[in-house]
Structure formats: structure tokens, C-alpha cells
Image (spheres, coloured by chain):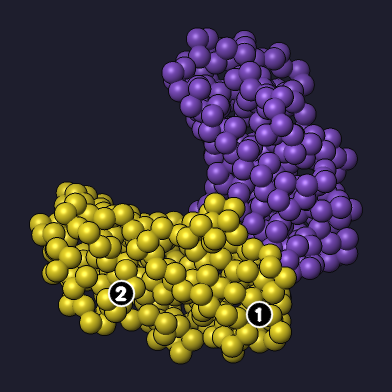
Chain colours: A purple, B yellow
Amino acid sequence: MTKPILYHSPVCPFCQRIDILLALKGRQQDVDVHTLDLAVPRPDWLLQKTRGTPALPVLETADGHIVKESLVILQYLEDIFPDRPVARRDPWQRAVENMLTRMDVDFFSQGYAWLMNQDPARRDTMREGMLKQYAQLNDFLLAHAPGGPFLFEEFGWAETVFTPFFQRFWFLEYYEDFRLPDDARYDRVRQWVEACVTHPAAQQVSRELVIKFYYDYAKGCGNGVLPPGRRKSSLALEPDWRARPMPPQDKYCHSATDADLGL
Amino acid sequence: MTKPILYHSPVCPFCQRIDILLALKGRQQDVDVHTLDLAVPRPDWLLQKTRGTPALPVLETADGHIVKESLVILQYLEDIFPDRPVARRDPWQRAVENMLTRMDVDFFSQGYAWLMNQDPARRDTMREGMLKQYAQLNDFLLAHAPGGPFLFEEFGWAETVFTPFFQRFWFLEYYEDFRLPDDARYDRVRQWVEACVTHPAAQQVSRELVIKFYYDYAKGCGNGVLPPGRRKSSLALEPDWRARPMPPQDKYCHSATDADLGL
């Protein structure tokens, strides 16, 4: 039987959302995965399928239809694989997780903006902005799920949406020395983050993978754009990230060469 | 029996989405509506309910829970009033309408940005940006629903999401002399817009209402902020908009007084 095909990158947090959902459902064997290298432009055959959209993930259904946007793909997979539901079925609980899900854009935008910031004078503002985002999640969780660790009894839809970003933000620990302050204002969200990043269904990436792949982002260059003087993107799948040295932590005063990065 | 309460403004396009959904379901009598005046700050009792969020619409469920964000409220009402479904049930069709729905932010942001623009030198750029948005909708509809007029057989979820903005953009006709060019690139989206704005379930607002309420936006002042020299917002519910004169069309070289606007 034809399976859906997921066009995918191991670096991409939006793609990892799909991996997590399939893991929660025990459906990894029911979707074929086609891995793409984000260091090179998307191939023409894929852009034809997506009518020009380079963004991943993309799902090709068993009928040959193309589904774009991670949240839309999550819902599609939730619908075609209804066993072991990940989304809540109760209308109010579904509304709660949808409200939390809609906080994702501001959250991840702030983290990526900080990582890509190149002006040392703006670090404090960026840190404050990031803390404000965590405080908003903390407030939401205190209002709707004070006990924790998850929004409901189990790792579910909201966790599937946010966990890839909690893990990507390991890049802020490394390149910006950012950790959530030991302050009661962040206790509830800290508990959530820790339960999310250690959940068995969400182990697709490691700190080391994130830090190595995102070096160019830390130098202000996203989506495969090359920093000055470089010939190869840190997003490249080859050489294998495990074989590369850890990048320099100082993003503001130092620029690594391809050789420094093992590329 | 206790009914949900909708906190609502007749000006607000996000609120109108809820009105349309309830009309499609024939459920207007099953929700109590509390109308707010956007010309004054949100009252403390409402901000307590929403934990500080001033944005409308807000739905208070029959159990006293608070649901925020129009798309979340739509889904909640779709779930508690499952008769006459508005969202598609087929997974692929649901994915199609969800993909289209996710194009809403760029679409309405462009229209509001153009309305609020105060620099005549940027008008052409704004017009091009708006046309690009319509062209993207046109392409999507041609790919997924070439026959039309709607995305599926009937006015549904995507139409509920977009129609309030098609109607708000009457302000671009009036203040920016914008109409979709008579060009085949926009034929399919023009057909969609016309079918949407004339649908019986979407007659909550008129051109005149939109043009009068949005005068201050046309002067660059959103959300009840007052233009210089003014003492009353064009968003005010009183005096009744029907009794006010039409505002001046020239937003760039002329500033109307409260008296000119009948406020």
C-alpha cells in the first residue's frame, strides 16, 4: 500500500513536530521519510510539488496531494491515524491547547531573533524579551494546569508543538549563556520544559546537533545563507555533525572558518 | 439553561467570524452577546476574565471558562454545536481549508498596513503588496477549487475566516481607490470575494459602517488611539454610525474634525 511521504530535515523544528506526533501514535512505519539537506536550495521537483514553497515539512498524501505547514500536517495525520489521539477531544480542553498553541509564533520568533542578533548592545533587550515569553507560558500553565508537568495528563498536542523549540533553544544556552533564572516566576514553565525535552517521543535531536547545525544562525545567517568568507553552511548534512568539533561559543567577536567547523 | 456569552464588537472582523459561524449553524439564539465600545478601554471586569488580554472576541463558556482568539472560539463552537458542520470532515479537505486559513495573517496585515500608511510615496508599494496577496489566494483557489465560487460546495470554514476582511477592505476602495484590476490573474479570487461578501450569513456589516468606523485607521490611528486634535474616536458606537456623514476620502492631505465626522 502507498504510504504518505514526509519531506523532512532533521534540523528543522517544524519537521520534528511531525516526528513527535508519529512517535506518540506509534506510526513511524506508516510514513516514508525523504530527508533534505537545508544547505542546498530545494530541488525543482519538490518546488513543483509545493507550487514554489521552499518551507519544510511537506507531506505528500497516499493520493498524491500536497499538505504544507506543520500544524496542518499534524491535524491531517491526527485525522487519518485516529488511534491514540494526541489532540484532546473535549471541546474546552481542545480550546485550551489551541490557545497555548497559538502562543508558538511569538515564542519561537523571539528565540530565533535573539540567536541571530549580531549587536552586543541588544543582548539585554533580547534576554528580557525571551524571559517575557517564558513568563507568559508560565502564567498560562498556572491558570490551566497548575499541577503539571504537562498541560493535561500526558504529553499531547501543545507539547508536540513546543518541544522542538525548547530543544532548539539549547542554542541560546550555548551562544548566549541563557538559562531560565532560578525564580518562582518561571517554576511552572521550567517544569514543563524539562518534562517535554526528556520525553521518550521527543528524542530526535540532541544539544550537540542543535549547537553544531545552528552556528550560522548564531552568526546572523539563516536558511543556508553563508556568513562572509565561508563556503559551506553549518546546516549541511555532510560531513556528519557527530564528526565535527563544537563551534566557538563567542558569536559576537569571533567568526569560525569552514575548517574550524569541520565542514 | 446558561448560554455562552460572546464579548464582541460590530466593528471587529475577528468578532464577525463568530457571528458568521453562528449564522451558518442557525445558533445565534444559543449565545448571549455583550457588545463593547472599542472607543473606550476594555473594562476591568473583562480584563480580569481574560487575564489582561484586551483583544476581542472573547467567549465565556456556559461553565464560566474563557476562550480567546477567534479561530479557537470558532473551533470550540464547531465542537459544541456539531450540527450543520462548517469545517470539513474529510482529512484532506480539512487540510485544504486549514492551508488556506493560514494565509489569513499576511492577507489582513497587508490591508491594514496599507489603510494605516500615511506616506503617499509608499502607496504604490502597498498596492503591489495587496495585489500579491490576492494573487496568492487566486493561485490557491485555482489549484484546489478551479470551478468555484467557494472552496468547496458551500460557504464554509475558509469563507468564515476571510469574509470579514474582504468586507473590511471596502475601506481600501474608499480611502485608497483600490479595486482588483480587471485581469485574469485575479478572476478566481474576484469570484470568491463576490460570492463571500454577498452570502446571506455574512451580512453583519455594510460598506458605510466600515468606512465610517475606520476613518481613524485611515489616519494611521488604530485601536481607539485618537488622531491629533480629535477628542472622540471614529470607533465610537455613539452617535450611531448611520447618523454620521461620510468621512472625507482624502486621507493624505486632509484631517477631519470630530464635528466633520458627526462624532
Q: How many marks?
A: 2
* Residue count near mark 2 (Cα–Cα under 10 Å), binned few <14, some 14–19, many ≥20: some
Residue beneath the point at 54% across and 39% down: A109
Q: Amino acid at mark 1?
A: Lys
Q: Position of residue B223 (x, y in %)?
A: 36, 58
Q: Is residue B84 above or below residue A61?
A: below
- Figure quadrant of residue A202: top right
Residue beneath the point at 67% across and 34% down: A185
Q: Position of residue A180 (x, y in %)?
A: 68, 27
Query: The disc numbered 2 marks a residue on which chain?
Result: B
Q: Position of residue A6 (x, y in %)?
A: 72, 52
Q: Nearer the viewer, residue A233 or A249?
A: A249
| Image mark for residue B3 | 1
- Figure quadrant of residue A197: top right
Residue beneath the point at 64% across and 63% down: B66
Q: Position of residue A101 (x, y in %)?
A: 66, 53
Q: Nearer the viewer, residue A121 or B176?
A: A121
Secondary element type, mark 1: loop
| Image mark for residue B238 | 2
Q: Nearer the viewer, residue B88 or A86?
A: A86
Distance between the alpha carbons at the discs numbered 1 and 2: 28 Å
- Which residue, as the protein is rendered here, is positioned at the far left? B253
Q: Is residue A9 above or below residue B184?
A: above
Residue beneath the point at 59% across and 74% down: B5
Secondary element type, mark 2: loop
Quadrant of the frame with the N terminus of chain A: bottom right
Quadrant of the frame with the C terminus of chain A: top right
> Is residue A50 shown left or right of residue A80?
left
Name the N-terminal-most of marks 1 and 2: 1
In this rendering, does residue A76 appear at all?
A: no
